[in-house]
Image: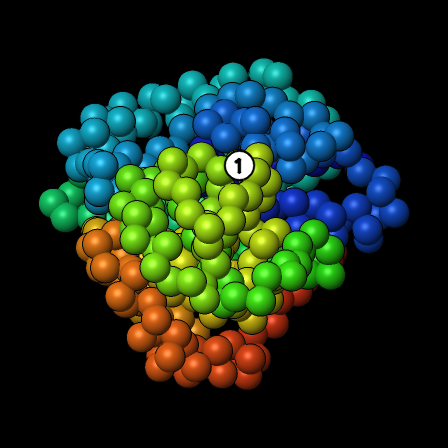
Amino acid sequence: MKCKIYLSDEGYGHIIRQKAITDSLLSLLNHDILFDVQTKNNFEVAKKIFEGFKCIERYNNISWLKLEDGSPDLLAIKKHYIDYLDVSNDFVITEQQCLEPYDFLISDFVYEAFEIGNLSSIPTFGVAHFTWDWFFSKLYPPSVQTKVLDYLFLLSKKATRIYFPPFTPKEILKHYKNAVSVPLIVRNQRINQIKFTDENFKVLIIDSGSGLLKSHIETALKNVNQLKDISFYIPDLYTEKAENIKEIPYSDLLINYIGGVDLVISRAGFNTISECIALRTPMLLIGEAMNPEIQENIINLKYHGLASFISLNTFSQDLNNFLPTFIKNEYKAVKESMQNHSFEVNGAEIIAEDILNNL
């Protein structure tokens, strides 16, 4: 069999998510399947994760444009999507002209894939924890035209099925008639996790894929040398050095370290959240201004007691004072909730089985 995967050009989460799904499909089909993976902005990461797969470097249309503080750049977003309908139509035509005889397509989350599959009578499966039509509809003032949002929703209706994990906004599940709810989608938790012999309290700091928090992390690290009983694990791209700052190779996947630490400090990105829940590692999450996805994630995590939260200003300016008090008090409740949660984490296997049942 042969499958083409259309990956969004935003973030790393969908890359890890699809690796989990492709691993499950390979296992079910006794490795008798070939995958082509298409993306652009994170092409080098995709090539590394999907080693041995054919990777195609092509931009897949969706972009989320931000200001330096991580908030949406509404003017840039408006400009980017002003001619989206024409760009999308050209993309579909070009893809159809070079489309190989695939047995099915997976989109995570590229809307045009659903139209391409529909026109070619190829089953097409979507995977997402939110949809871009929902996301852009939440921005104020509106920056994406209603006709574009309607168009995106129309394309999504052409998917064979769309798989949504926990924390997906309820209004999406309600309006997407081809929605299928599945457990969290994570990699095999028995492999890849790196353990440490460090006896200190271990903290892993994870930035966004686009490096939005880099300057704030640099500032936060200036005073952590005072915290002798806490070790901070960070990529080796930061300039701050201290005895309790432990560097990780930048080329490494930080999610491979989640299972070996006591706490993850990160933005509330869905892939990091999913991996932490699966590995039962407590989270201290940094808010992100005017990001509908992040706000939805935070609401759900608060409801389940699976994370604590810190403002960006407190993180960058006062982490050395905040963290010891947090560890002594609130951390204990989050750790207990993490140890006792009942979230299932076999979404990749369920999706793989369901795809094969619907071919």
Q: Secondary structure at mark 1?
A: loop
Query: In the picture, residue 172 is in which quadrant?
Result: bottom left
Q: Amino acid at mark 1?
A: Tyr
Residue for badge 1: 250
Relative vertical location of residue 33 with respect to residue 274 in this rendering, above or below: above
Q: Residues within 10 Å of mark 1 (few under 14, many from 20)?
A: few
In the displayed orientation, state which residue is furthest to the left: 141
Residue displayed at 34% across by 21% down: 86
Residue 136: x %, y % from top left: 27, 45
Residue displayed at 50% across by 25% down: 40
Residue 117: x %, y % from top left: 58, 35
Relative vertical location of residue 4 with respect to residue 307 in this rendering, above or below: above
> Taking 3 as reference, is 308 left or right?
left
Instruction: Please name whichever residue, 157 or 134, is drawn nearer the observer in this view of the structure.
Output: 134
Residue 21: x %, y % from top left: 67, 50
Instruction: Please name whichever residue, 238 or 223, is drawn nearer the observer in this view of the structure.
Output: 223
Query: In the picture, residue 227 is in which quadrant?
Result: bottom left
> Taking 321 as reference, is 184 left or right?
right
Instruction: Please name whichever residue, 344 or 338, is drawn nearer the observer in this view of the structure.
Output: 338
Q: Residue 253, can we see it?
A: yes
Residue 211: x %, y % from top left: 37, 38
Q: Residue 157, can we see it?
A: no
Q: Quadrant of the N terminus?
A: top right
Instruction: Please name whichever residue, 280 or 300, is drawn nearer the observer in this view of the structure.
Output: 280
Query: In the picture, residue 213 is in which quadrant?
Result: top left
